[in-house]
Amino acid sequence: MSDGTLWVVVLAGALGCYLLKLAGLSVPAAWVEHPLVTRVVEFVPAALLAALVAVQAATSGRDLVLDGRLVGLAVAALALALRAPFIVVIVLAGAAGALVHVLVG
């Protein structure tokens, strides 16, 4: 990608972000205060974080990879569901992922 093309992409992205922000500010307050909208907006950060974690745990580049990261994530989810302390969740997830890596290669 040449320097000129890169700057066009950066400026187009910046303009798109600005227009998206402007569109958000232009929405009438009654729409934003609607209970359904409020309820959906409360879950957006958690959904975005879950999507990022899923992509990082199950992909490598453009390939779908099922390895120790996914096992570690599953163990962490189970430990969190059982209300384990955060340090225990981290240690269990790391140990599970490392064990799968050692066993599978």
Image: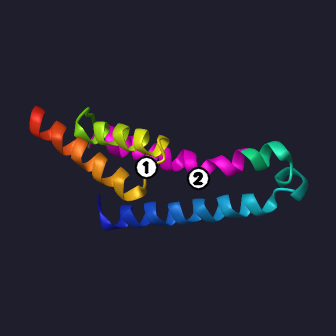
Q: Position of residue 12 (x, y in %)?
A: 52, 61
Q: Which residues are magenta?
A: 40-60
State whether residue 65 is above or below residue 53. above
Q: Residue under circle 1?
A: 84
Q: CA distance from mark 2 to mark 1?
A: 23 Å
**Closer to us: 34 or 29:** 34
Furthest-right residue in this view? 30
| Secondary structure predominantly adopted by residues drawn in magenta | helix
Q: Is residue 17 left or right of residue 27?
A: left
- The amino acid sitting under disc 2 is Pro
Q: Residue at x 69, y 51 (%)?
A: 42
Q: Position of residue 63 (x, y in %)?
A: 26, 35
Q: What element does badge 2 sit on? A: helix
Q: Is residue 2 left or right of residue 99?
A: right
Q: Nearer the viewer, mark 2 or mark 1?
A: 1
Graded by Cα atoms within 10 Å as few (under 14), some (14 to 19) or many (20 or more), the crowding at tag 1 reads few
Asked if the magenta segment contains residue 91, the reply would be no
Q: Residue at x 25, y 49 (%)?
A: 94
Residue 45, numbered label: 2
Q: What element does badge 1 sit on? A: loop
State whether residue 33 is above or below residue 99. below
Which quadrant is home to the C terminus? top left
Q: Residue at x 64, y 47 (%)?
A: 43
Asked if the magenta segment contains residue 53, the reply would be yes
Q: Is residue 23 left or right of residue 5?
A: right
Task: Say which quarter of the image contains residue 21.
Answer: bottom right
Q: Position of residue 80 (x, y in %)?
A: 45, 45
Task: Say which quarter of the image contains residue 98.
Answer: top left
Q: Is residue 54 left or right of residue 32?
A: left
